[in-house]
Image: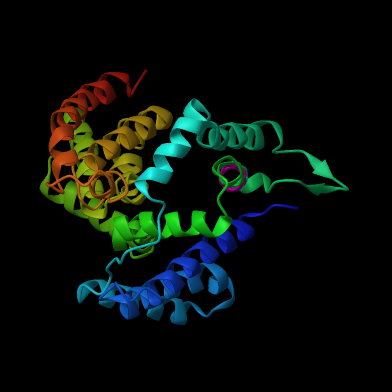
Amino acid sequence: MIFSITQVYWLAGLVMAAVAVFNLLDASNPKRWTTGLFWGLYAVMFLLGDKMPPEVVGAGVVVLALIVLVKGVGGGKPQVRSDAENKESALRLKNKLFVPALAIPVVTVIGSVLLKDFKIGGNFLIDPKNATLVSLALGCIIGAAMACKMTRESPVQSLRESRRLVDAMGWAMVLPQMLGMLGLVFSDAGVGKAVAHVTTTYINMDLRFVAVVVYVVGMALFTVIMGNGFAAFPVMTGGVGVPVLINVYHGDPAIMAAVGMLSGYCGTLLTPMAANFNIVPAALLELPDRNAVIKAQVPTALGILVCNVFLLYFLMNH
C-alpha cells in the first residue's frame, strides 16, 4: 500500500515532536522542560512505538502519568499572528476561509468510500483496513496546505498554531488514547467475567426487564468510569449482554449492541474522563467552569438512557 496507518502515526509523532521543541525553546513557559519531556515522550511512542519493547512503552506511559501528577504540563506564549493580521486576512478571504476546513471531510469521504479499493501498480493507494483514518490524515494535510497558500503563511506557522491548540488542551489530549487501551486491559484481565459473577450473584436476573436495566445502566456507568464507550462495551457485553440477554433471553445481538453503545454514549456526556468531548471543548472555549459542557448535557443523557431501557426491552426479541 502507498498510504498506510503507520505513516499517520509518523505524522502525529512529528507534530508532537514539533510541539515539544517549541515548548523547550519557549522561555515564557515556566514548565518548559517537563512540558517538552511530556510531548517528546508522546512523540517517540508514535514514531517508534512499534519497534520498542512493550515494557519500555509502558514505562514511558508511567512517566507521562507522573509528569501530569506533579502538574508538569504547562503552556507558554506561542508565536501567533496579530489581531490586525487576522482581521486583514479575514476581510481579504471572507468565506473562502471555510474551504480548507471543508476539504478535510470531503477528502476523508472520497478516500474511505471511493478510493478504498483503488490500486496503483498492484498496490493499494490507501490502507483498506484503516481507510477512514488514513483518508482523514490526507484530508488534514491537504487542508493545511490550502490554508497556508490562502493565508500566505509557512508550514512552520501551522505547527505553531498546532502547538497553541495542544497547549490549550494540555495533557487531556492524550486521555482518549489511554482510555481506549484501558478497555483492552480490562478485557484481558477478566473484568467482564467478574461483572457477570457479581450481577448474577447479587441481582435477580430472572426478570428480563431487570437484566436490560443492568446492561443499559451498566454501559453508561462503566463509560463514566472509563471515559470511553468502546472501552466499556467489551466489559458489559461480555459480562451481561452475551451470557444473559442473548444466551438466556435470546435477544437480537445487533439490537443489543446498538442500544448498548448508545447507552455508553450517554455515559460519555456525563463524565470528565471523556476529555475530548467535555473538558477539551471547555478549555478551547475558555469557559470559566470546566464542567459547563457536562452540566448542559446531563438532561439529554439521562433522558436518552431511560428511553434506551424501554427501547431495548421491547425490541430485543423482535
Q: How far from the left and from the top, in percent, is residue 251?
A: 35, 29
250 on left or right of 267: right
Q: Nearer the viewer, residue 78 or 208?
A: 78
Count the marks.
0
Residue depicted at 21% across the width and 73% down the height: 69
Q: Which residues are magenta?
A: 135-144
131 on left or right of 217: right
Is 138 a magenta residue? yes
154 on left or right of 283: right
Residue 206, can we see it?
Answer: no
Q: How far from the left and from the top, in percent, is residue 151?
A: 54, 43
Q: Is residue 71 placed above or below 314 in the rendered structure?
A: below
141 on left or right of 161: right
Q: Nearer the viewer, residue 102 or 204?
A: 102
Examine the image and state in which quarter residue 19 appears.
bottom left
Q: Is residue 79 placed above or below 303 in the rendered structure?
A: below
Q: How far from the left and from the top, in percent, is residue 229?
A: 32, 45
Quarter holding the C terminus is: top left
Secondary structure, magenta segment, majority class:
helix
Residue 80, can we see it?
Answer: yes
